[in-house]
Image: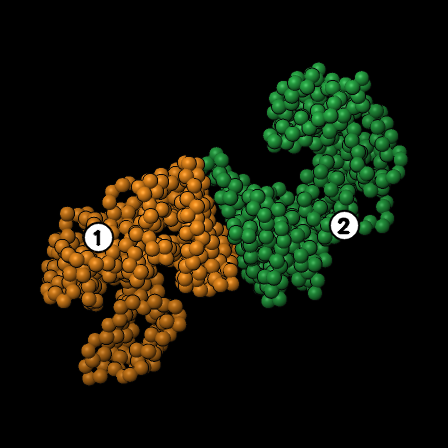
Chain colours: A green, B orange
Amino acid sequence: MSIVVQKYGGTSVGDANRIRNVARRVITAKQSGSDVVVVVSAMGDTTDDLIKLARQISDKPSAREMDVLLSTGEMVSSTLLAMALENMGHKAISLSGAQAGIRTDATFGHALILSIDPGRVVQEIKNGNIVIVAGFQGVTKDDDTTTLGRGGSDTTAVALAASLGASVCERYTDVEGIFTADPRVVPRASKLKEISYDEMLELATYGSKVMHPRAVEMGQIYNVPILVASSFNDYPGTLIHGGLMEIRNKVTAITQDMDVAKITVVGVPDTPGIAASIFEPLAKAGISVDTIVQNASIQNITDLSFTVTKGDADKALRIVGPIAENVGARECVADTKLAKVSIIGSGMQNTPGYASTMFSTLFASGINIQLITTSEIRITVIIADDKANEASVALHKAFELEK
Amino acid sequence: MSIVVQKYGGTSVGDANRIRNVARRVITAKQSGSDVVVVVSAMGDTTDDLIKLARQISDKPSAREMDVLLSTGEMVSSTLLAMALENMGHKAISLSGAQAGIRTDATFGHALILSIDPGRVVQEIKNGNIVIVAGFQGVTKDDDTTTLGRGGSDTTAVALAASLGASVCERYTDVEGIFTADPRVVPRASKLKEISYDEMLELATYGSKVMHPRAVEMGQIYNVPILVASSFNDYPGTLIHGGLMEIRNKVTAITQDMDVAKITVVGVPDTPGIAASIFEPLAKAGISVDTIVQNASIQNITDLSFTVTKGDADKALRIVGPIAENVGARECVADTKLAKVSIIGSGMQNTPGYASTMFSTLFASGINIQLITTSEIRITVIIADDKANEASVALHKAFELEK
């Protein structure tokens, strides 16, 4: 019998009624003929509440203890879902990450899954149980509880689906699927029936908050199709999968990221080692640097720009300022009112014309482009953040993504 | 270095401030030169809240799932205490029951400890850690979480103390120690410096709510001295231990239990098998029968009385009524307004006169005795519950227990 892994997010299991609703959906899946393994997040605000509790005790709780604390949230929701299923007459059992065989490294707070031993899960399926696994957690070789960090429960679900050879990983939240653009920004955005792993990775990395790239990446590596759908209705969702034989739209979706600041080191002598001397201290300070652009140098003098989150801009400037002065750069400036807008689509690959349509559309709207970066299936422009919504709407229309 | 096991109850870790207070007490113990292992209960009302949550989902949640759910309460409090200790500059680590090597049978909800493998605890002590163990929980050989039921965290603490060869198990709650009587009933009751395991077992079984007999029994078997004291002040508590070479008071304490109902089967033919025919159905219905008294039979007719909790009286009567009729008994009556008052003391052993002092004291107060039962170190009378307080006060005075 085929196995389906379903994952339900925190709002989907936010209270007793919603847990019962999830139980009914799980039963429907079971009755349609599959073995069902369910992964759950912690109920609603549980994780935030636990973090607040820890903060009352210590302003810097150890990562190991924090992980034990946070892992209880998913244990509570998984056991409540098992109770709900039993109450509706179905055999069910909850398993912690450790019991489900999810072995991780020991980087508490954002552990990486090393392997999954699905023995217990398989045995419980054979026993006729619907198996509920606490998401977001695993266990080290020393038997210590870890949490997986951002995107953790999704990653648990996809990893379990891979190790069980499941036919699909269905991921339910309060979001109906992947749209051609954020419907709050572009009212005429439409839901995609399917999207490739590559496109979804670009979307997730370049602003879409629907799904963390980590789980998508694992889905791609192990070729696990991921259905993104809502637990609050029965509308069809979006299937993230591999081989899309026919691509109807060359551009699949528009995404934007409002949290962008740009640091520019102006007039840098273009000598080897300059980039390293700037970016090493930033990495050591834990600042994630995103896009990096270096202009062609004129008379061995160049400008170096990079983007960080708005919250990191001041800190980055304080670190880079003295270095810039040291290497003889003219000045170091920050612009903290920026956004990224990207067009994404496998169909763009090796096909000219997309960039020029994008740029001319923005030009026609009077939007100035500050930086451009591209991948094989993505073109990103960095523009003023108060123009981002307008840019998305215009591009959505230009690339014929409207309903 | 000697090991001290400290156990803190739910009110002692009820909020962040109280957890910090407990951390300070633990540090004091550590600084006085011992290795410290701490066992904690769940914070305040956590366990009740989790039970309420389960009830919202299912009116009869499975015991296995219930145990996973409830076990999270002690995990939260143990990890918060570890954080508090770390925040005060001390190395600390929290361990679940499973990690602390507490193996139990699989009777979920009231599991019995089979063995303790203290390897991890010993290792963490060697690593210089104060070890915090989540109370009330263990793990089966199949790696499933269990809870130990009533008196569970105390039992965890005493069992750990036994397996670690600790010098003492200190058990801190909001109660200052063991008193000669309940101070709310007998204002002149005084705190005992020490009490024997046997006496404490009788006290706990016959009404004192200070400590569940289970942990006392384990302390006795493994000869672990148990200090009962308050976590809210530094007054000396009461030491429960074995060989009391000198006993100053022959009677150590008075205790009362208000939750007593009596069922009497009147005019039973005194033939073999009658008692079994009555008590077997009660046991099967889960009714715990306490004192049983059968009068001497006259012309092969006897009266059979037994006590149950007030809540079980109706059910017991419904079960026993038809049986009584069947065996030709005259009638079956219940009295639900009773209490037990007991005097307890190892000094009473083989010493006459205690019973007569007790009975004459009650007679002088105009209190009628309905049933009498005794052990080697206890005499219990069953009387009207509205006379219980008066009886306790009179007996406390008669046996010279006043301050």
The local secondary structure at tag 1 comes to strand
Asked if residue B69 can be seen in this view, the reply is yes
Residue drawn at the location 86% of the way across and 27% of the way down: A360
* Percent coordinates x, y for residue A32 in the rendering: 70, 62
Residue lying furthest right: A352
**Residue B326's x, y, as percent?**
34, 81
Please state which of residues A307 and B373 is positioned toward the viewer in this rendering: A307
Q: Residues within 10 Å of mark 2 (few under 14, many from 20)?
A: many
In percent of width and height, residue A368 lies at 79, 23
Query: Which residue is rendered at x = 30% and y = 51% of the image?
Result: B168
Q: Is residue A36 left or right of residue B365?
A: right
Identity, as a three-letter code, of the amino acid under mark 2: His
**How far, Cα to Cα, is label 2 from label 1?**
71 Å
Q: Nearer the viewer, residue B360 or B400?
A: B400
Foreground: disc 2 or disc 1:
1
Which chain is indicated by disc 1? B
Residue at which label 1 appears: B194
Locate residue B300, reporting x and y percent. Answer: 22, 84
- Mark 1 neighbour class, 10 Å CA radius: few under 14, some 14 to 19, many 20 or more: many
Please give the residue where the numbered disc 2 appears in the rendered image. Answer: A241
**Which of the chains bears the disc numbered 2?**
A
